Image (spheres, rainbow, N blue to C red):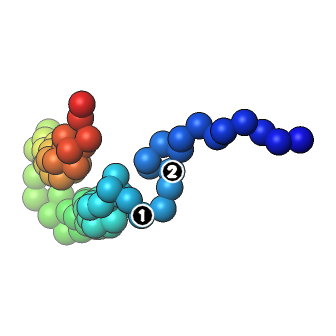
Amino acid sequence: MQQGPQPPMPPWTGGPGPLRAGMRWRVTASILIVFGWLIFILLYAAFWAENFNLFQNIVIFFASIIAVIMLLAVMWAAWGMRWAP
């Protein structure tokens, strides 16, 4: 039985195309940034956390999370703004 015409595929499901341009390095950078943050937190907890009190450690933890989120948001916003209507 023959099927009718297939609806067009969304651009993000196909192979290399204009939507995927610039995505590879952003995904790689995102993974590296998250692992770098985890390494920073582990090293901080192992070597430097004892020099600060609990509240200072909490502030450093949240400030590092905010810095990572801002870095990722700026990096991905440039890619997302290319595809905004």
Can residue 19 be seen from the camera position used here? yes
Camera-side residue of 23 and 6: 6
Q: Write the residue at 38% across / 59% down.
A: 17
Quadrant position of residue 3:
top right
Q: CA distance from mark 1 to mark 2?
A: 9 Å
Camera-side residue of 41 and 82: 82
Q: Write the residue at 32% across / 56% down.
A: 18
Name the mark on residue 72: none
Name the mark on residue 13: 2
Q: Please, what is the three-letter code of the amino acid marked with disc 2? A: Thr
Q: Is residue 13 left or right of residue 25?
A: right
Q: Secondary structure at mark 1?
A: loop
Q: In which quadrant of the rendered image does the N terminus lie?
A: top right
Binning the other alpha carbons within 10 Å of mark 1 as few (below 14), some (14 to 19) or many (20 upward) gives: few
Horizontal and vertical percent for residue 73? 20, 44
Horizontal and vertical percent for residue 62? 19, 42
Q: Is residue 29 left or right of residue 55?
A: right
Q: Write the residue at 48% across / 42% down.
A: 10
Q: How many marks?
A: 2
Q: Write the residue at 64% across / 40% down.
A: 6
Residue named by callout 1: 16
Q: Secondary structure at mark 2?
A: loop
Q: In which quadrant of the rendered image does the C terminus lie?
A: top left
Camera-side residue of 12 and 44: 12
Can residue 42 be seen from the camera position used here? no
Residue closest to the far top: 85
Q: Is residue 61 left or right of residue 24?
A: left
Q: Please, what is the three-letter code of the amino acid marked with disc 1? A: Pro
Camera-side residue of 41 and 78: 78
Horizontal and vertical percent for residue 33? 25, 62
**1 lies above or below 43:** above
